[in-house]
């Protein structure tokens, strides 16, 4: 692939023959007889290209297209340019690479800007609705944040399950007489008392929806929507190199963030079902807390 840096845009050329056919191009330029004017393109090929300097012709994969003050063009590798044209070439290469990065970033941002309405529509579609992302976020956060309906005993257990990555809900109790006998028969010695046994209550689906990586408010509102508000009025053609780099990197993450939000929404919906969360009722001993948690469960469609 060859990329020519014209005044207004990047011109991509697929075939080396197209470069060889350019007016003024030579593959046998005498560097002693010419003064470098500028770098006009760069290239990278799977097969090696011979350096265009008459006293070099070293084969290489990547290099630059240069033009001399006499108007002649040729191709040289980075080392050749440094060796035969010195600091002038190095400075031109640095500036060319920066210009290329800026123009590629501008192209990317202009392309992204034409998709903004589609992006905003996709975010709205995810957020709105009876069981959209906004509802999932508000309802699921009650399971971990301090609130009125979900008792602290449930929130504490969910917090522990999130830290351990365990979806299995269990209840601990003292062993029965029969279980003591079985343990003593198995070990051949008296069992230590009290012996605690964990009973499986349920395998809770979708707890990972409560992890920070799946925070729907963070993804859709604080990241995507807030950045869109800042980006939308910007004049892309006037952005600095630093600004171009920043926004180009962000734009490159948008599709993945939308996909993450969509997956997080589905995980949240799996979590938020009465049948899935009802087993936590087994942890609650206080009658008022039981009524409160029941009210929370009934708020889930």
Image (spheres, rainbow, N blue to C red):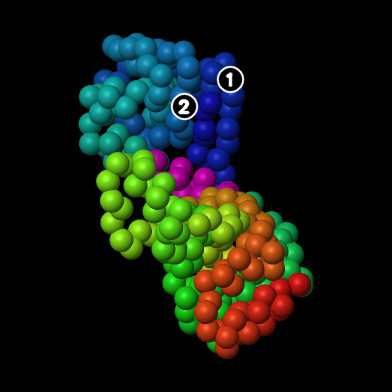
Q: In this view, does 31 lie to the left or right of 223?
A: left
Up-down relation of residue 151 to residue 217 (above or below): below
Q: Magenta residues?
A: 97-109
- By secondary structure, the bulk of the magenta-drawn segment is best described as helix
Q: How many marks?
A: 2
* Mark 2 neighbour density, 10 Å: few (under 14) some (14–19) many (20 or more): many
Q: In x, y percent, where is residue 51?
A: 37, 16
Residue at (63, 54) in percent of width and height: 263
For the residues labelled 2 and 1, the Cα–Cα distance comes to 10 Å
Q: In x, y percent, where is residue 250?
A: 50, 56
Q: Which mark is residue 15?
A: 1
Residue at (48, 66) in percent of width and height: 158
Q: Mark 2 points at which residue?
A: 43
Residue at (67, 82) in percent of width and height: 295
Up-down relation of residue 49 to residue 70 (above or below): above
Q: Residue 176 carries which label?
A: none
Q: Nearer the viewer, residue 88 or 290?
A: 290
């Amino acid at each position: 692939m060859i990329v020519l840096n014209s005044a207004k845009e990047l011109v991509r050329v697929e075939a080396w023959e197209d470069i060889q056919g350019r007016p003024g191009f030579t593959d046998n330029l005498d560097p002693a007889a010419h003064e470098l004017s500028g770098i006009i393109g760069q290239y990278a090929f799977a097969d090696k290209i011979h350096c265009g300097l008459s006293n070099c012709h070293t084969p290489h994969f990547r290099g630059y297209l240069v033009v001399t003050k006499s108007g002649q063009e040729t191709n040289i590798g980075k080392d050749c340019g440094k060796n035969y044209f010195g600091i002038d070439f190095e400075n031109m290469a640095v500036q060319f690479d920066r210009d290329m990065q800026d123009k590629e970033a501008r192209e990317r941002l202009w392309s992204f800007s034409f998709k903004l309405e589609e992006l905003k529509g996709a975010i709205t579609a995810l957020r709105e609705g009876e069981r959209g992302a906004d509802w999932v976020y508000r309802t699921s956060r009650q399971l971990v944040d301090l609130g009125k309906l979900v008792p602290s005993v449930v929130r504490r257990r969910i917090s522990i399950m999130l830290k351990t990555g365990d979806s299995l809900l269990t209840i601990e109790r003292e062993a029965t007489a029969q279980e003591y006998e079985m343990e003593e028969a198995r070990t051949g010695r008296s069992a230590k008392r009290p012996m605690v046994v964990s009973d499986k209550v349920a395998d809770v689906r979708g707890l990972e929806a409560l992890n920070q990586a799946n925070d729907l408010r963070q993804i859709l509102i604080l990241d995507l929507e807030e950045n869109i508000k800042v980006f939308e009025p910007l004049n892309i053609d006037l952005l600095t190199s630093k600004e171009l780099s920043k926004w180009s990197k962000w734009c490159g993450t948008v599709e993945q963030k939308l996909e993450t939000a969509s997956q997080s929404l589905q995980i949240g919906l799996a979590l938020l079902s009465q049948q899935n969360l009802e087993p936590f009722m087994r942890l609650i001993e206080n009658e008022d807390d039981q009524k409160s948690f029941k009210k929370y469960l009934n708020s889930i469609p």
